[in-house]
């Protein structure tokens, strides 16, 4: 696939925005983008004052930023309750009647919550949580599917200043338990089950398994989504409460008053913790704070998605990932947008589901991932052809590099050749979009993720920190702190400093390799650390390896990525067994073991048994060589001078199936 990116690159194709789009866009030309970008770096104080005028601050900020790297604070001195920007402020305009969330369940049920209703639901849940003893600074875990209540839960926490940690519903009981224990959550919000491709994901059942060993959890609040027939959910006396029962009780006057007139918090108050994979077995609790995160999500949503009155914006990401946090909940709601939310799988009941949703509800902006686009391509053009997609006016892509073939298909078949595509590069840690092309203002190059967002000083550098020449590959780094950057890793500040700030002095290291072309456009190649991107899911090789090694039959394991047409990268694991264990029947057992330790989405695409793994003389597994074996490369590229035993490699190659 990378070969075709290279060959397309040579053609240097540019897609100019249409005049029609530019005429109405917020930023209408490349020159205007450049001057705003310059201002964001040269006069940040002034820039952010102008750009945050519509956010609600209780106490205005004194200074935009104070930093002493790697520490940085933004909107210093400000206080705010972030939910007032996302909810209350819209009630005085059209929020009583305007849809905040248009939701479609997988079975086809539809619900719309206006801003008024969303606000009301958030207040009711916030009051209930307050009565259960939730206070500012407490952690609340959210293990739910794609239902409006997940957004309600996040906002109710934010209303009280409680720090939420959403754990993706695809994670297993063990993964949930580890995350709850790491952040010390007091309350868990969950649901009986969630619909996925016609099946029920038994969230409450998995939560029960997790809660057997989570000493900090006092209460679990359980939403009824599926019902007892298809998804029995036994309730534990004293610990578990049904969501509707809990909300039906009249909250105390004090809790009601608190929810209605919520306190304001410091700009740097922790808003959420979101776990993501890194290069060790333990997931990282990326922590974001309030004002800077909100400002980043708000400003990028406004400009990158060019949200206007009348739009119905759909970000297809699960709310359990950062894209769902920033571009389904906080960014769009802070802009007063109407957002589409869909519960289930893109191929339930068939591959036309997304296109039927777009036609039925009139979606105008679609933000999805290359892995989904490639799956749609494979399913065939007949599915989108069955539907009228003319409501769409803008398309977005996120999660991994989009190959030019997929870009072109997305543009032609879904966008009808008229919709600009914004390819957005960012990370859980960056909080908001760092690289993209503003629609209507800048041309795009298929496969390139474009230009820096406002306030982002980003560069491709060599190991010692010198900037690379145009088109020279290097490390992608950010040279100046930005408002929505993660402030730490929960309970592991040392790792925060080490992972992001100690790689090169005074710059943030992204973990990605990239190059910048002669027009200043960035081309992200992918991770250069031990992190894989499998179907848009970020998976740490060490995480998979430690899960495998925890199986009684496994002695050693090495996980590597292999190029895959559909998933971008496929996960291949090499396993050596302990004496007395037989590989027979073990493949299925190890796959199930991964399901249990991490979640089904992390299941290896191939498991290969071997007598030994290639290692350096100092005992480090040489993943680079395994990657070549996994990819079926006949020749060994690069330096193997440190390889301890060549026969290991020869044997692996001979075994290649
Ligand atoms: C990693 C971050 C933040 C959105 C979802 C993923 C890769 C993300 C792009 C893009 C090329 C991309 C990078 C990055 N990535 N977007 N547009 N082009 N690569 O968040 O799980 O924190 O993963 O995803 O490798 O470092 P995440």
Image (spheres, grey):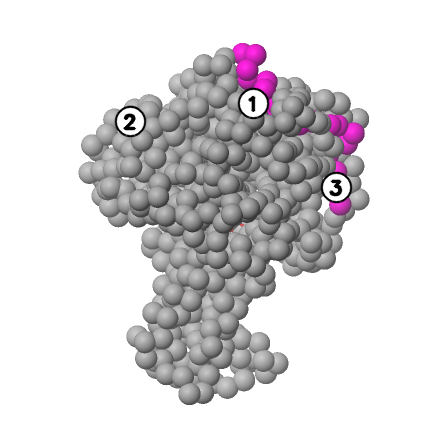
How far apart marks 1 and 2 lie (CA) works out to 27 Å
Q: Secondary structure at mark 1?
A: helix
Q: Residue at the spot x=56%, y=59% of the render?
A: 213
Q: Is residue 92 magenta?
A: yes
Instruction: Give the mark nearest the N terminus, 1 or 3.
Output: 3
Q: Quadrant of residue 384?
A: top left
Q: Position of residue 228 (x, y in %)?
A: 35, 43
- For image coordinates 75% across by 22% down, the residue present is 60
Disc 3 is placed on an element classified as strand
Give the residue pinned by disc 2: 359
Residue drawn 36% across and 63% down? 605
How many residues crowd around disc 3 within 10 Å: few (fewer than 14), some, or many (20 or more)?
some
Disc number lying in front (1 or 2): 1
Give the Cα distance between marks 2 and 3. Answer: 45 Å
Q: Which residue is mark 3?
A: 72
> Which type of secondary structure does the marked residue at label 2 adopt?
helix
- Marks 1 and 3 sit apart, C-alpha to C-alpha, by 28 Å
Q: Earlier in the sequence, mark 1 or mark 2?
A: 1
Residue receiving disc 1: 87
Q: Which mark is residue 562?
A: none
Res 581 → quadrant: bottom left
Tell whether circle 3 marks a residue whose Cβ is less than 8 angstroms from ligand 1. Answer: no
Tell me whether circle 1 and circle 3 mark residues in contact (CB < 8 Å): no
Segment tinted magenta in the rendering: 71-93
Which mark is first along the chain, 3 or 2? 3
Check the image and report above or below for 598 versus 343: below
Residue found at x 74% / y 32%: 266
Q: How far from the left and from the top, in percent, is residue 286?
A: 62, 48
């Amino acid at each position: 696939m990378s070969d075709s990116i290279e060959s397309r690159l040579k053609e240097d194709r540019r897609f100019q925005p249409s005049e029609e789009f530019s005429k109405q866009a917020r930023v209408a030309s490349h020159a205007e983008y450049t001057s705003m970008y310059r201002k964001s770096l040269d006069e940040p104080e002034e820039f952010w004052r102008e750009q945050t005028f519509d956010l609600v601050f209780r106490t205005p900020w004194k200074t935009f930023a104070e930093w002493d790297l790697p520490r940085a604070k933004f909107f210093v001195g400000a206080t705010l309750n972030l939910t007032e920007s996302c909810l209350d402020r819209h009630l005085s305009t059209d929020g009583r009647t305007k849809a905040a969330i248009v939701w479609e369940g997988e079975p086809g049920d539809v619900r719309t919550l206006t801003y008024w209703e969303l606000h009301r639901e958030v207040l009711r849940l916030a009051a209930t949580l307050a009565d259960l003893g939730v206070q500012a600074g407490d952690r609340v875990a959210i293990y739910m599917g794609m239902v409006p209540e997940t957004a309600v839960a996040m906002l109710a926490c934010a209303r009280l200043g409680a720090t939420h940690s959403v754990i993706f519903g695809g994670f297993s009981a063990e993964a949930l338990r580890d995350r709850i224990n790491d952040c010390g959550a007091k309350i868990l919000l969950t649901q009986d089950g969630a619909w996925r491709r016609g099946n029920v994901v038994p969230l409450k059942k998995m939560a029960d398994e997790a809660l057997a060993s989570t000493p900090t959890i006092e209460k679990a609040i359980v939403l009824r989504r599926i019902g007892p027939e298809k998804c029995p959910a036994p309730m534990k006396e004293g610990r578990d409460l049904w969501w509707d029962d809990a909300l039906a009780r009249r909250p105390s006057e004090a809790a009601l008053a608190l929810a209605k007139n919520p306190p304001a918090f410091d700009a740097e108050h922790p808003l959420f913790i979101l776990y993501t994979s890194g290069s060790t077995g333990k997931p990282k609790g990326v922590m974001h704070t309030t004002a800077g995160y909100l400002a980043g999500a708000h400003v990028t949503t406004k400009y990158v998605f060019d949200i206007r009155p009348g739009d119905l914006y759909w970000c297809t990401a699960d709310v359990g990932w950062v894209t769902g946090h920033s571009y389904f909940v906080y960014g769009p709601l802070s802009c007063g947008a109407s957002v589409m939310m869909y519960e289930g799988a893109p191929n339930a009941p068939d591959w036309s589901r997304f296109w039927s949703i777009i036609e039925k509800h009139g979606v105008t902006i679609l933000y999805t991932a290359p892995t989904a686009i490639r799956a749609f391509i494979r399913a065939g053009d007949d599915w989108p052809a069955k539907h009228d997609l003319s409501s769409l006016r803008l398309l977005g892509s996120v999660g991994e590099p989009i190959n030019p073939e997929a870009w072109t298909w997305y543009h032609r078949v879904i966008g009808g050749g008229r919709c600009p595509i914004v390819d957005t590069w960012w990370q859980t840690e960056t909080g908001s979009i760092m690289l993209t092309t503003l629609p209507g203002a800048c041309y795009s190059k298929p496969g390139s993720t474009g230009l820096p967002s406002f306030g982002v000083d980003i560069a491709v550098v060599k190991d010692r920190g010198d900037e690379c020449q145009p088109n020279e590959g290097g490390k992608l780094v950010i040279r100046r702190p930005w408002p929505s950057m993660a402030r730490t890793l929960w309970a592991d500040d040392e790792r925060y400093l080490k992972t992001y700030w100690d790689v090169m002095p005074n710059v943030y290291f992204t973990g990605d390799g990239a190059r910048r072309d002669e027009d200043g456009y960035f081309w992200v190649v992918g991770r250069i650390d031990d992190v894989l991107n499998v179907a848009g899911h970020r998976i740490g090789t060490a995480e998979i390896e430690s899960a495998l090694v925890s199986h009684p039959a496994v002695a050693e394991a090495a996980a590597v990525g292999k190029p895959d047409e559909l998933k971008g990268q496929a996960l291949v694991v090499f396993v050596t067994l302990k004496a007395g264990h037989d590989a027979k029947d073990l493949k299925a057992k190890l796959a199930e073991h991964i399901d249990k330790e991490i979640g089904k989405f992390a299941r290896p695409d191939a498991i290969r048994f071997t007598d030994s793994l290639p290692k350096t003389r100092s005992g480090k597994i040489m993943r680079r060589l395994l990657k070549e074996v996994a990819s079926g490369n006949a020749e060994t590229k690069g330096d193997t001078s440190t390889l301890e035993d060549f026969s290991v490699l020869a044997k692996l190659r001979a075994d290649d199936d």
